[in-house]
Image (cartoon, grey):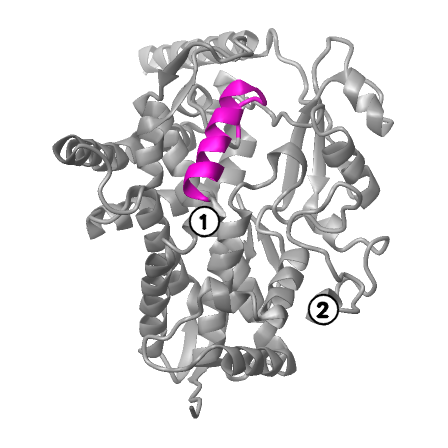
């Protein structure tokens, strides 16, 4: 018995010594995280993102798992030659307005699949998020990879994107930039967080390899040029220190996977978030829904297989106003983060945050700016009319101009979202079809809808929208 007690005491003592050693090692050079400067004033946001865009163009470089931090994404790569090459490729090659017409069949098939899915639940109550997410993700996969991706790969990628996005805020707040001790204490969450890239790579790389084989067989791209096609052809500067980008290299597999993962998540989640929030408000405000449906059915021919096109969207000003009002109240991305030098921080009247030259973290709160009483009348009210001719926000769009910032759901300055054009079209197509085909109303025994927000990677409804949907028949 005495021997057992001694063994237990020795084991406990060794555990304490190990704990103290790890604690000392991980805290020896640690320093407290900088206190962010939160910006909620539209004028200060304009000063940062428009007037001094170059100074406020770097996003924070948190210590994420090596596979994420060492590979490029447009969202996180430092402002410089590599960032410009990645962004130019996306905007000029994939998301250019001239390509919208080419992608119309993809959008039409995605919308048709969504309507068919919801029709099986109507009349009745439906939770729209899952059906909407499946349709939007399938559309994004086709833009990213082209046709021919197996359903099993599509669903596997969708699961990984959803898992990462829903746990990102909780896991990254605890683990990104954390000490070894924190990662040891929360080892299961660290393995899940750090293993995301490996799991995604196992799904994505075989699809890319098949695409490379097809390109070699056919001597180039077949069908509509995809995002992956552009990444395989892209050459980026060998070093950001080379201002003229005289030496270039192809992207590595890790970099391509990271860019693909970013594209799949950003394009899908922003669309789903905006459409779901908008439908919630339309169910709460039937008079707005009725007005919107009248505009859609009066403009777009109704019939089997007839869906809203980009050309039709230009003739639907109230639909655009409804979308903008939804984006003002519920921006898909809730915050804009910028790392700024201590000297540049003084631009906004912020003193140097530290004596060791560490950057100052600026956080522009998109939600609060969009609801600022300084910029809006009755800012918490859902009122699309404010964006129509003669309204207080006539001429205000999804990306602010250089002179005034009143809302910035897609960011502003150098690093505004490159997918704003395609995003607005996708949201418009999905929303127009959903409103034209169904009437959206409150569920039984409910007098409202829970509009509580949940800040994950994107701003989503904490309680997924459940609404009563009734097929709407239009006499033609």
Helix, strand or loop at disc 1?
helix
The N terminus sits in image quarter: top left
Name the residue at 69% across, 25% down.
54
Name the residue at 76% across, 61% down.
393
Residue at the disc numbered 2: 388
Distance CA(mark 2)–CA(mark 1) = 27 Å
* Residue 160 locus on image (x, y percent): 34, 42
Q: Point out the stretch of residues depicted in magenta.
A: 76-95
Query: Residue 442 is drawn in which quadrant?
Result: bottom right
| Residue 443 vs residue 208, the one in the foreground | 208
Helix, strand or loop at disc 2?
loop
**Label disc, if present, on residue 98 of the rendered structure:** 1
* Residue 387 locus on image (x, y percent): 72, 65
Q: Earlier in the sequence, mark 2 or mark 1?
A: 1
Magenta part, dominant SS: helix
Q: Nearer the viewer, mark 2 or mark 1?
A: 1
Inspect the magenta stretch and tell me whether residue 148 lies in it: no
In this image, 110 relative to 125: left or right?
left
Residue 41 visible in rendering: no
* Residue 284 locus on image (x, y percent): 61, 76
């Amino acid at each position: 018995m005495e021997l057992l007690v001694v063994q237990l005491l020795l084991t406990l003592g060794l555990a304490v010594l190990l704990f103290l050693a790890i604690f000392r090692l991980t805290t020896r050079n640690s320093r407290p995280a900088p206190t962010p400067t939160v910006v909620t004033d539209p004028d200060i946001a304009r000063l940062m993102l428009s007037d001094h865009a170059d100074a406020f163009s770097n996003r924070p470089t948190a210590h994420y798992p090596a596979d994420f931090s060492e590979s490029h994404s447009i969202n996180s790569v430092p402002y410089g030659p590599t960032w410009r090459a990645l962004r130019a490729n996306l905007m000029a090659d994939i998301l250019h307005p001239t390509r919208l017409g080419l992608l119309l069949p993809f959008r039409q098939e995605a919308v048709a699949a969504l309507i068919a899915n919801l029709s099986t639940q109507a009349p009745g109550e439906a939770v729209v998020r899952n059906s909407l997410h499946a349709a939007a993700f399938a559309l994004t996969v086709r833009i990213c990879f082209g046709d021919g991706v197996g359903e099993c790969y599509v669903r596997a990628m969708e699961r990984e994107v959803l898992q990462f996005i829903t746990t990102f805020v909780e896991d990254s707040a605890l683990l990104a930039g954390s000490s070894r001790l924190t990662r040891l204490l929360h080892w299961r969450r660290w393995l899940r967080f750090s293993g995301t890239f490996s799991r995604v790579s196992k799904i994505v790389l075989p699809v890319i390899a098949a695409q490379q084989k097809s390109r070699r067989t056919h001597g180039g791209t077949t069908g509509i040029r995809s995002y992956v096609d552009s990444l395989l052809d892209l050459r980026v500067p060998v070093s950001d220190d080379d201002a003229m980008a005289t030496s270039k290299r192809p992207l590595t597999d890790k970099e391509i996977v990271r860019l693909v993962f970013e594209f799949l998540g950003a394009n899908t989640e922003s669309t789903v978030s905006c459409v779901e929030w908008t439908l919630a408000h339309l169910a709460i405000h039937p008079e707005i829904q009725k007005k919107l449906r009248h505009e859609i059915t009066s403009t777009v021919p109704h019939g089997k297989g007839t869906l809203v096109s980009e050309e039709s969207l230009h003739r639907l000003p109230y639909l655009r106003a409804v979308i903008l009002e939804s984006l003002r109240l519920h921006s898909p991305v809730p915050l804009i983060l910028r790392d700024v030098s201590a000297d540049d921080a003084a631009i906004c009247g912020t003193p140097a945050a530290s004596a060791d030259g560490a950057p100052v973290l600026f956080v522009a709160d998109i939600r609060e700016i969009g609801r600022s009483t300084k910029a809006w009348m009755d800012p918490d009210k859902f009122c699309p009319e404010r964006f129509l001719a003669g309204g207080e926000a006539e001429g205000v769009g999804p990306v602010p101009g250089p002179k005034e910032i009143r809302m910035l759901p897609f960011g502003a300055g150098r690093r505004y979202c490159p997918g704003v054009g395609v995003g607005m079209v996708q949201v418009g197509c999905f929303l127009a079809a959903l409103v034209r085909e169904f009437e959206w109303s409150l569920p039984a025994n409910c007098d409202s809808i829970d509009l509580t927000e949940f800040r994950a990677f994107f701003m989503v409804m904490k309680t997924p929208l459940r609404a009563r949907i009734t097929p709407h028949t239009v006499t033609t």
